[in-house]
Image (cartoon, helix red, strand yellow):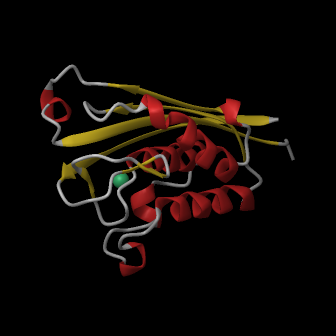
Amino acid sequence: MTVRVGFGFDTHRLVEGRAFWLGGVQVPHVTGALGHSDADVLLHAICDALLGAAGLGDIGHHFPDTDARWKDADSKVLLKQVMALLAGRGWRVGNVDSTLVLERPKIKPHIEAMRAVIAPLLGIDLGAVSIKATTNEQLGFVGREEGVCAYAVALIEKAAS
Ligand code: MG
């Protein structure tokens, strides 16, 4: 078995008048993340972790924000496409761990719903999808609620050929 690990990071600006998509779930809040797609910072970080593990570049390479196809795109579709790229090369996911960084709203009530969306997209058990959340202790742009960040690591594996 060949195993590889990948890392992903993403950040998006928070603005009024946008739906707040996080981990494939719409979270009720006074602001939402701004971006070309639905700006789901957690799914983007997971996409980058998966692409990085497979040595396939990054999300901006595969889904450029200059491409009208990805305007307001559902990031679950992007994740599905990333999974298809990996599957085509014989990779499957072992597990994913992630951390969201934002001041508000509280993420804990939404974590189980996010895991239930993400696990089937990755083809893994709920127990192999970890989502954690922390505030930034009111420091910096996250602390001022101007933005949201996400970090993710992914382990992928394939049978040795
Ligand atoms: Mg992004």
Q: Position of residue 60 (x, y in %)?
A: 39, 60
Residue extending farthest to the top is 137
Q: Is residue 26 visible?
A: yes
Is 62 located above or below residue 2 in the figure?
A: below
Residue 54 seen in the current view: no
Q: Residue furthest bottom?
A: 68
Q: Position of residue 147 (x, y in %)?
A: 21, 42
Left/right placement of residue 83 relative to residue 97 reads right
Residue at 43% from the left image edge and 63% from the top image edge: 61
Examine the image and state in which quarter residue 36 appears.
Answer: bottom left
- Taking depth in this image into account, of 100 and 4 the one nearest to the observer is 100
Where, by quadrant of the figure, is residue 9 drawn?
A: top left
Residue 126 image offset from top left, x and y in percent: 68, 36
Residue 156: % across, % down: 68, 40
Residue drawn where x is 28% and y is 46% of the image: 29
Q: Name the quarter where the N terminus is drawn.
A: top right
Residue 110 left/right relative to 127:
left
Judge left or right: residue 20 versus residue 26.
Answer: left
Task: Please tell me which residue lies in front, 113 or 121.
Answer: 113
> What residue is rendered at 32% in x and 38% in y?
149
Residue under the point 35% across and 73% down: 71
Residue 97 lies, with reference to residue 68, above or below; the image says above
Compare residues 125 and 11 and report the one nearer the observer: 125
